Image (cartoon, rainbow, N blue to C red):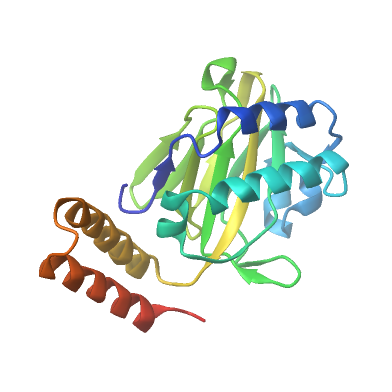
Amino acid sequence: MSQNFIHIPALLKPEEIVEIESLLTKASFTDGKLTASMAAKEVKNNLQIDATDDSNLQIQKILNTAIQQSPLFNIAALPKAIHPFIISKYTSGKYYGWHVDSPMMGNPAIRTDLAMTIFLSNPSTYEGGELLIQNGSNLVSFKPEKGDAVLYPCQFLHCVNEIKSGERLAAVTWIQSNVKAPEQRQILFQLNQVHSVLYQQAPNAAETNLLLQTHSNLFRMWADV
């Protein structure tokens, strides 16, 4: 895990990917600008599944089951509420320019602490289409394997590079965390990682229990409930 971004390998199982791909062949897509904020409409040039499409509803169930079963996602995001996924399609010439996500989304509204992109296309099948995130003076690029996900705080400017050839499919969602501050989530994540190692080595050691106690007390102190 980097300071701000988490790559979740194989978030989707192979059989889940196959089922989603089958559903995508039946889905109807609309202009992505329909769900963009006023500022984002100027830079959003993609397609997305109609929210009322039967295929979309089935894909939502598969994706929600996958994230519920992902220990890494749940440890890192500490989710309180999750926005419905938007399934997007980028074909040749499509892109999503530099933008920052809306601070509140949905009805009822949730605070967008984190965003997550689940990649639904093999990277070798399309040219371009990288997810770029501006982290201070550093530009971070993601183009992982099909079924992988990238989780990142919403305060960063980000974009999807123009597709030169092929087709890029992805599912995007936003998460309200039980811990609002990214720095605090980072500390809790790191403590959890260290505790996991200690637990494997000495599950009943005083140090292992003390670290778990520290993690629990900090989570209790910072929890936004």
Q: Residue furthest front?
A: 204
Q: Residue at x 17, y 56 (%)?
A: 198
Q: How many marks?
A: 0
Horizontal and vertical percent for residue 42?
Answer: 71, 48
Query: In the orientation shown, which residue stands out farthest toward the left?
Result: 206
Q: Is residue 79 above or below residue 92?
A: below
Q: Nearer the viewer, residue 213 or 124?
A: 213
Query: Residue at the spot x=62%, y=49% of the render?
Result: 65
Residue at the image point whose x is 55% and y is 50% from the top: 67
Point out residue 90 in the picture as x, y percentages from the top left corner: 69, 30
Up/down of 32 relative to 190, above or below: above
The answer to whether one can see residue 2 in this image is yes
Residue shown at 70%/38% (left/top)?
88
Frontmost residue, 156 versus 210: 210
Which is more toward the observer, 33 or 220? Answer: 220
Quadrant of residue 17 within the rendered picture: top right
User: Where is residue 23 drawn, in percent x and y?
Assistant: 78, 31
16 versus 37 height, above or below: above
The relative height of residue 217 versus residue 17 in the rendered view (above or below) is below
Task: Give the image quarter of residue 166.
Answer: top right
- Residue 176 screen position, x and y as percent: 55, 67
The answer to which of 225 and 195 lies nearer the viewer is 195
> Can the viewer see residue 42?
no
Left or right of 69? Residue 221 is left
